[in-house]
Amino acid sequence: MKLYSQLAFYLTLAAATLALHAQSFNSIRGKCSIGLSEEAGKFSLHINDTDCHSERNCGSNFSNEAMSRFTGITPADLDREGTHITATLAAEAGTFTCTGMVADQELVGDGLFTPDSTFVDRMAELGFTGFNSEKLEAYTFLNVTSDYARSLQQAHIHGITVDNLVALRIFNVDPAYSQTFPSMGYELPDADKLIALKVQGVNADEVKQIRALGYQPSLDELIQIRIFKITPDFIHRMQDRGFKNLTIAKLVQIRIFKLAD
């Protein structure tokens, strides 16, 4: 009897834990509109918050999403004034729906984001924790998946977090891009450095061009080269104007102080 009571206790505790876990990922409601984007093959999606609590940033969000990511809506539907539509965007992290009526070639209605707790469990197995509904909504629209996170880990990229996975996805940092740098003799950059490199558009071809001029720039200098537009043409022009011993640092100073003007 005592064993049964203990079993019942643990089952009750487990059920309570699961309930608390589910409650921690509440749905997010808002007003939504979907229309045709200026980008071919995409819908424009606007979301205005209605569930706005003190711990959240209230406001409006906008994105252009590939039409292929939606079900329940087509471009032709937006020509059917007054038609009732539920457009659905499903991803591993959750599902977003926009339910309403077509008016002036836009679907206007109520948005609902429903997080997927099984995704959170899969990410926890990879070592990623600290999710909330807002992060899961961002993951959904950006289509951040557990496979994507796993692929970065398998590429031995260090410093990946729940937060910078969003930036890694936005800037399309993938294992192939990360391996660009070891192939050129650099140590494998960590996640934040890869984001900085990709944001500035650092690529192998330009690195080879700079190296061909005798420079051996560090990863930080590669970022500066892009920020301050230190191109081979710029270097040649500065040399022609009589500048000597032009290090990367000196070239950056020439740009900062507009000595090339």
Image: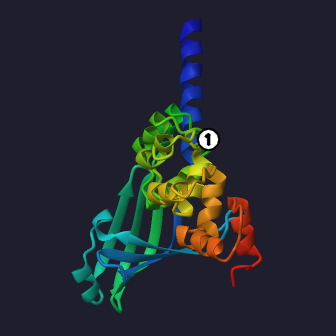
Which residue is at a point 53% across and 23% down the rendered structure image?
Answer: 11
Residue 139 image position (x, y, % from top left): 49, 55
Q: Which residue lies furthest to the bottom in this view?
A: 104
Please name whichever residue, 103 or 259, is drawn nearer the observer in this view of the structure: 259
Which residue is at a point 49% across and 36% down the rendered structure image?
Answer: 153
Residue 185 seen in the current view = yes
Identify the residue under disc 1: 159
Residue 43 image position (x, y, % from top left): 35, 76
Residue 184 to residue 47: above or below: above
Type of colouring = rainbow
Q: In which quarter of the image is the C terminus?
A: bottom right
Which residue is at a point 46% across and 65% down the rendered structure image?
Answer: 112
Q: Quadrant of the N terminus?
A: top right
Residue 107 image position (x, y, % from top left): 36, 81
Left or right of residue 85, residue 161 in this image: right
Residue 98 to residue 22: above or below: below
Amino acid at dot 1? Gly
Residue 15 image position (x, y, % from top left): 54, 31
Residue 51 seen in the current view = no
